[in-house]
Amino acid sequence: MQQILKYQEIIDDRLRNYIFPDKPSNLYDPLRYFLKIGGKRTRPALTMLSCSLFGEPGIKALNAALAIEMFHNFTLIHDDIMDDAPLRRGQQTVHEKWNSDIAILSGDTLFTEAINVLAQNDAKDLPKLIAIYTKTSREVCEGQQMDMDYESSSTVTIPEYIEMIRLKTSVLLGAALEMGAIVAGVENKQDIQNIYDFGVNIGLAFQIQDDILDLYAESSKFGKQVGGDILANKKTFLLLKAFELADETIKKEMNILLDNASGDEKVIKMKQIFDQLKVREEAELLKTFYYKKALKNMEDISVSSESKHSLLELAESLMTREF
């Protein structure tokens, strides 16, 4: 994990000390605040690890990595507004500390700053990097819209849910890795496809793990509200699988809880139903399925097994995380 931690520390230091203009303070202070409360810096570490995987120093991909993390933080600021989330990483969300209008503008500014940083890469790589950035941006927005649409829909299927999380979450991990490969000068299209698919499959497994943690994590470690997905009536894999497995009596009980209950009572009773139906176990099986697909993607990349060690180590840590 030494190389991973090194890259995460470099990214974290650059973001915490990133220089924004002083004024208007209500535009830039929220960004300084949000970037300083930290984060796992997983996505930018993937970019630097991917560059290293293909034989170039990871630091060569620093600007691409910073752009990926800035974009990710932009999505978090906006997601928190749409979810009306009070906490992020154990701290007040931007819209709670300031207000929603300020949070929207600050998030928009971070989106454009990410492009500015990305543009500092070698000119020969820019067309490919910008294409990855814009494609991923569009897909993430599509996934977020699907997520919001699904909150009020009663006909969401598990395949539709998987497609939604692929767009909302997984493509950004794939893009992070693909950018690292581009900066490293990889021209083998199959290697580029495999490193991208590795990220997407890890992302799917990661999001399913996140669904599990949203309900089953220890609140002291999680950094955000436990049971938030249930309170927001989000169509997670756990909820969809519960409806698939439940008899008519339990389905009726769940619908009453979703429509009428609130707060701790709603979370506790839904969790009891999930436990009864063993949907957590089903989620663990699906997570493992996508993790194994990712391992196969990595196996097919034409570099040495030794070079793959750090990325595989990071992937394993994502699958076993508790927060």
Image (cartoon, rainbow, N blue to C red):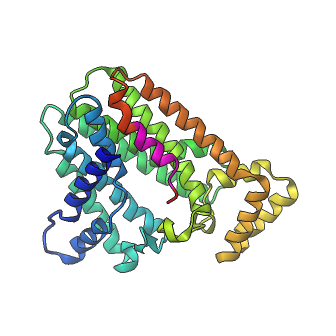
| Residue 122 left/right relative to 71 | left
315 in magenta: yes
Query: Image height check: is 173 above or below 70?
Result: above
Q: Nearer the viewer, residue 113 or 47?
A: 47
> Is residue 171 in sight in this rendering?
no
Q: Which residues are magenta?
A: 312-321
| Residue 185 left/right relative to 260 | left
| Residue 21 left/right relative to 269 | left
197 in magenta: no
Q: Nearer the viewer, residue 57 or 72?
A: 57
Report the magenta stretch's main SS: helix
Residue 103 occupies which quadrant of the picture?
bottom left
Q: Nearer the viewer, residue 24 or 2?
A: 2
- Give me the residue at 22% from left, 53% from top: 10
- Give me the residue at 34% from left, 67% from top: 104
Q: Position of residue 84 (x, y in %)?
A: 49, 71
Query: Image height check: is 206 above or below 39?
Result: above
Q: Position of residue 176 (x, y in %)?
A: 33, 42
> Is residue 291 in sight in this rendering?
yes
Q: Position of residue 297 (x, y in %)?
A: 45, 27
Q: How many marks?
A: 0
- Give me the residue at 21% from left, 34% from top: 183
- Give me the residue at 13% from left, 73% from top: 22
Q: Nearer the viewer, residue 110 or 205?
A: 205
Q: Position of residue 279 (x, y in %)?
A: 71, 51
